[in-house]
């Protein structure tokens, strides 16, 4: 596995923080909202963060390609399938939340090697909170000059605290949550849900319907490093850049892997 040294870790974290500053500069002013080909929203903040992250990562790791949401259409599967390593970048995860001005959006960076996430950063621009982790190490929560190791809630006891996407909740999600017994629902946007799972503030996050690989990779390694897990609909760990499509299937994220998740998924 590629070594993540201090320079690489702190360089990536600094880029996420720079992107957050650029996002906030636009968030605090009037801004226009465009629509991409899939009808999802696009703002100047997405594009500003994209430029900072892509240019910065290309300088930081010249030999590792960068796949960003805002330039994904320029990258074909024939190109990607040759990449053993790549950066998966979502410059502004939760653009819908950004447009609503509810603060629930993030900057996501993840380094992938042979389909597995080996390092990830999630930055919350509004609060300044930042989470990061590397494979084999702890999950870390950084706020200002302080940093602490975090762990998910194990064992998770009833009532389970269940996250659902604020902008994408549907009938399948509601039906799944109904299987869990007593619950405390919490709506939260973007990959911040993974971080709340990692620090013990949530227990279960079911997601039905499309997400993209850059939406989940950074949050996945933060959660797994905190003791949790993320599995697809067949119970397999989530992997990246293994298929022509960049879309994920359904998945389930848990703070406590000992919960009866197989029963829930098969019921």
Image (spheres, rainbow, N blue to C red):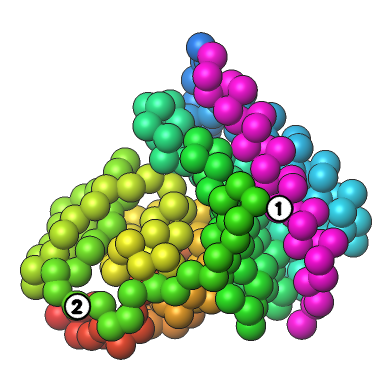
Quarter of the view holding residue 197: bottom left
Can residue 6 be found in the magenta stretch? yes
Is 246 or 226 nearer to us in this picture?
A: 226
Circle 2 is placed at which residue position? Answer: 157
Instruction: Indicate left or right for 166 with 159 as reference.
Output: right
Q: Position of residue 244 (x, y in %)?
A: 61, 63
Q: Which residues are magenta?
A: 1-29
At horizontal 52% and vertical 19% (from top left) the residue drawn is 28
Q: Disc 1 on helix, strand or loop?
A: helix
> Residue at position x 54%, y 14% from top?
29
Q: Residue at x 33, y 75 (%)?
A: 153
- The image quadrant where one finds the N terminus is bottom right
Please tell me which residue is depicted at 43% across the width and 48% down the height of the picture.
Answer: 190
Q: Is residue 116 visible?
A: no
Which residue does the numbered mark 1 point to in the structure image? 13
Q: Quadrant of residue 56?
A: top right
Q: Residue 194 location, x and y as percent?
A: 43, 61
Does the rendering let one see residue 152?
Answer: yes
Quarter of the figure that contains the C terminus:
bottom left
């Amino acid at each position: 596995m590629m070594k993540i040294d201090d320079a690489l870790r702190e360089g990536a974290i600094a880029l996420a923080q720079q992107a957050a500053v650029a996002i906030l500069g636009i968030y605090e002013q009037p801004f226009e909202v465009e629509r991409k080909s899939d009808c999802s929203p696009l703002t100047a903040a997405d594009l500003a963060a994209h430029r900072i992250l892509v240019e910065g990562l290309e300088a930081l790791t010249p030999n590792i390609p960068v796949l960003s949401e805002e330039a994904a259409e320029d990258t074909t599967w024939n190109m990607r399938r040759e990449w053993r390593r790549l950066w998966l970048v979502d410059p502004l995860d939760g653009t819908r939340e950004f447009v609503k001005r509810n603060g629930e959006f993030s900057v996501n960076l993840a380094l992938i090697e042979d389909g597995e996430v080996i390092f990830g950063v999630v930055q919350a621009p509004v609060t300044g909170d930042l989470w990061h982790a590397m494979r084999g190490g702890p999950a870390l929560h950084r706020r200002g000059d302080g940093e602490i190791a975090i762990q998910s809630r194990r064992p998770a006891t009833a009532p389970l605290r269940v996250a659902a996407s604020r902008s994408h909740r549907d009938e399948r999600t509601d039906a799944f949550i109904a299987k869990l017994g007593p619950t405390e629902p919490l709506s939260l946007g973007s990959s911040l849900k993974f971080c709340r799972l990692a620090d013990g503030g949530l227990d279960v996050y079911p997601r039905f319907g499309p997400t993209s690989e850059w939406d989940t990779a950074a949050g996945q390694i933060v959660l797994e490093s905190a003791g949790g897990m993320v599995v697809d609909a067949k119970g397999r760990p989530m992997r990246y850049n293994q298929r022509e499509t960049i879309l994920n299937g359904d998945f389930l994220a848990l703070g406590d892997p000992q919960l009866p998740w197989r029963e829930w998924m098969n019921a």
